[in-house]
Image (cartoon, grey):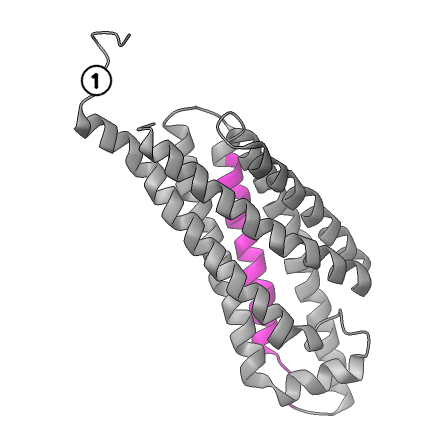
Amino acid sequence: MIADNVDVSPAKTNSAAKPWRQLEVSAWIALALHALAGLALLALLRDGLDTNPDPAARLRYVQDHSAAWMFGWLSWHAASISIVVFFLMLYRAADAVRESASGPIAVVLVIIAAAMDLAGQSLLIAFAPSDQDAASIEAWFTIQRIAVILSGYAANSLYSAATLLATLLLWPWASRFASALGLLVFMTGMALSVAAFAGSAEGMFWTNAVLVPAILGWLGGIALLSRRLARAGC
């Protein structure tokens, strides 16, 4: 039975559903861009990263494949921006039905994380080595380490914390599978941060191998949840 003072008009229902539809769109876009970035990591970036244990081979790869190197990082630029938009849409949708401090905190964390991420990635693009002299090579490896700390450690820690907050915020509506994936993103993201800070190439490789598919699954789960809630007129 519906109370007489509850507005169930189509206009009201459409207004309530709109934020969830926008969240669904932003989730699918973020998923597509993270899938592209994940492929770029495997196909275009891997041989120039710390996960390649041979420093000389890393250097040669970046020098010989400058266009691929730049495109690979630009794809991660797009993924970083898309996740900020996704979290903004998530906060807007969830806040309409459940007020919580975790929503705005997650947004702030993601914005700071994206700024650090973009800074680290931009360093790797802007200062890609072109010379073989010892000073240039030493400077490049220093820049790589700074980028790893910015993106792999600091940004990933904040992204992971924001994902945990978002998972808890959506817990009442999300499926167990989507919630589990959110927790997996948090745990593997934190593990990646530890590996990046420690400079463990093997640790960064295996955590990324789990993290990227987990992110894609979580974003897909949130997209499907948003579609269901939009149809329910939440």
The secondary structure that most of the magenta stretch takes on is: helix
- Quarter of the image for residue 56 reads bottom right
What residue is disc 1 on?
7
Residue 178 place in picture, x, y as percent:
56, 38
What segment carries the magenta color?
A: 105-130
Asked if residue 186 shows in the view, the reply is yes
Residue at the image point whose x is 44% and y is 41% from the top: 224
The relative height of residue 29 versus residue 18 in the rendered view (above or below) is below
Between 167 and 223, the one lying in front of the other is: 223
- Quarter of the image for residue 43 reads bottom right
Residue at the image point whose x is 69% and y is 59% from the top: 209
**123 in the magenta segment:** yes
Q: Is residue 10 left or right of residue 149?
A: left
Residue 34 place in picture, x, y as percent:
52, 59
Q: Is residue 121 left or right of residue 232?
A: right
Residue 13 place in picture, x, y as percent:
24, 28
The relative height of residue 190 versus residue 98 in the rendered view (above or below) is below
Residue 168 place in picture, x, y as percent:
57, 30
Asked if residue 200 shows in the view, the reply is no
The C terminus appears in which quarter of the rendering?
Answer: top left
Residue at the image point whose x is 52% and y is 76% from the top: 71
**56 in the magenta segment:** no
The N terminus appears in which quarter of the rendering?
Answer: top left
Between 226 and 160, the one lying in front of the other is: 226
Q: Amino acid at mark 1?
A: Asp
| Label 1 residue SS | loop
